[in-house]
Image (tube, coloured by chain):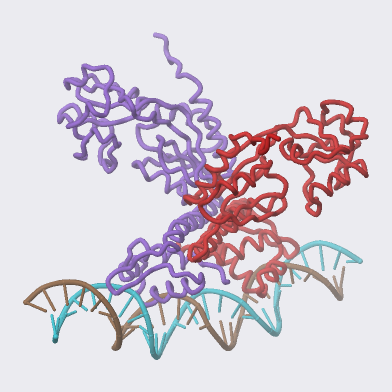
Chain colours: A purple, B red, C cyan, D brown
Amino acid sequence: MSDLETRQLRYFVAVAEERHFGRAAERLGMAQPPLSRAIRELERQLGVQLLVRTTRQVALTEAGETLLADARVALDAVAAAQRRARRAGQPTRSLRLALKADYDAGLLPRILDAYDVMPVELQLGGRGEQVPALLDGRADVALLPAPFDESGLDTETLLSGPTVVALAAADPLAARTTLTLADLRGRKLPDGTDASEGRMAAGVRKFDLSQIFNLVEVSGVVWFLPEWVARRFPRPNTAFRPIEGLDPVALKVVWPAESRSLEVAAFVRVAREIAQTPEVALAGG
Amino acid sequence: MSDLETRQLRYFVAVAEERHFGRAAERLGMAQPPLSRAIRELERQLGVQLLVRTTRQVALTEAGETLLADARVALDAVAAAQRRARRAGQPTRSLRLALKADYDAGLLPRILDAYDVMPVELQLGGRGEQVPALLDGRADVALLPAPFDESGLDTETLLSGPTVVALAAADPLAARTTLTLADLRGRKLPDGTDASEGRMAAGVRKFDLSQIFNLVEVSGVVWFLPEWVARRFPRPNTAFRPIEGLDPVALKVVWPAESRSLEVAAFVRVAREIAQTPEVALAGG
DNA sequence: CCGGATTGATACCGTGGCGGTATGAGTGAT
DNA sequence: ATCACTCATACCGCCACGGTATCAATCCGG
């Protein structure tokens, strides 16, 4: 009957993620007994068993899995409300734009130049950091390469292009104009996985693009990236070749689904217009 | 610093909606002083002024407006988590489908027949009740005529058609094949507003379609509805005429944006297939 | 088969947060 | 100027939440 409190959801998420009351309690900065009691009380309120405990392991029931997913969404929504309210009270307002360095397809300078509603604060981060930031209110809008999990978000595609592989110009494969994933069997990504698996190796956040291109040129590893990124970084000793059979990669502008912010809407409009306007040669000489 | 509790959000929403501490306290079933104190504490936690109080009126600051919108979303998310967890623990599962009576375009029987994942529980309600039910977890999926506020929801269009006006067959306008809004000047909707405004008069929830057609035939009022609804209810004394210049009305299947429910996904797939399959004549004879 | 380690549950206690009542203070209306 | 209205303050009492100590069940090594 009585309503859930975010405290109860935070406790449950901690236990469900740790699958261990002691570690969850430590993470929450509290002792284990009151945490156990709080979860019991939560189950009693819901009239549903969420966890199956033995003294050796904690497992989630189906209801627990359901609640875990929904609780994360709800906690993000609460955190977003808190953050946005804090910001809305500040005298100096800005738009927080989350993006991955080098993945703006050259649109960013023109967008920033054209967007004059308020100052734009850039939040550079690795892949995977932008979406959570949008969901919990740390960012207002993002520029991201698709695909990514779009639940809870609205998006608009700015441009789209094929995936290319970056390989050393001296590589025999560079002599061919197009490649398939199978051709890459044996080639490694910087993280050591085989390139023929076609994943865009995550977890290589320590490197920026020029460092990766250095690796490509000197150590024979390869690297996948969207064509609209590669085009911005021509290097004489790195060859970019399209991969057949991979889905195209879109650059999207992304914002929280429930956003009714005029500032975000204006940003999306500007981004759309810039993306549709070809980049003119600035100086004819 | 410390996290927001749903209790604080519920209190704030009550005060922000009532714009009156006393009434809000009454609505919350508590006394006014602790409510005032809780709002003060909330403002202190956020470091932001949410309300401008005088002894005569309570007004929202810009931060307050922001928080009101976000808090509603967050509270819906918490309520949805609670309801879905409760249901997930029940042994008998069902899919709760919210819709407006008579607005299924004839698809419903075939959809229900084809959907065999789990029992479907129908929630008939007036326009405007389905979307909140989806957002706070009282319903899993809905069939709705667009347009409606889609924030926080995902949708897929099943079919689309023009808006028509229902008028008495004896009405002089019924002699014409198409009409414009201007032609309807002077004609009234059942709620008394002028038909030439083009709104689909809300607030006439007490009547079902046959009652409305009765009104149309005997009292000279007119009524707007989608063509794909009108087609299902042929009546000799009611004429349906398309209105030029009005946007088409789509029938959409709608579900919570964050839903990753396989049951909902299966329902959407079935609905899509049914909508693309023309209704065959059941008996040729 | 037994003893120790691990881990969640129980018992009990103290405090702080939350809500209640009584009352004050500011403002608009007559 | 007085009254009505409404939000704020003061003060009080309770219980909900968290802490400590301990128990109980299970797994594992010997």
Which image quarter holds the N terminus of chain A? bottom right
Q: Nearer the viewer, residue B247 or A226?
A: B247
Q: Nearer the viewer, residue A5 or B205?
A: B205
Q: Residue at x 56, y 68 (%)?
A: A3
B97 w.r.t. B241: above or below: below
B135 w.r.t. A103: above or below: below
- Total numbered labels: 0
B5 w.r.t. A79: above or below: below
For residue B152, say whether it is visible: no
A120 w.r.t. A237: above or below: below
Is B156 left or right of A198, judged from the image as shown?
A: right
- Residue B138 position by quadrant: bottom right
Location of residue A78 in the rendering, given as x and y in whole percent from the top left corner: 51, 57
- Residue A39 position by quadrant: bottom left
Q: Residue at x 46, y 51 (%)?
A: A136
Spot the residue most to the front. B285
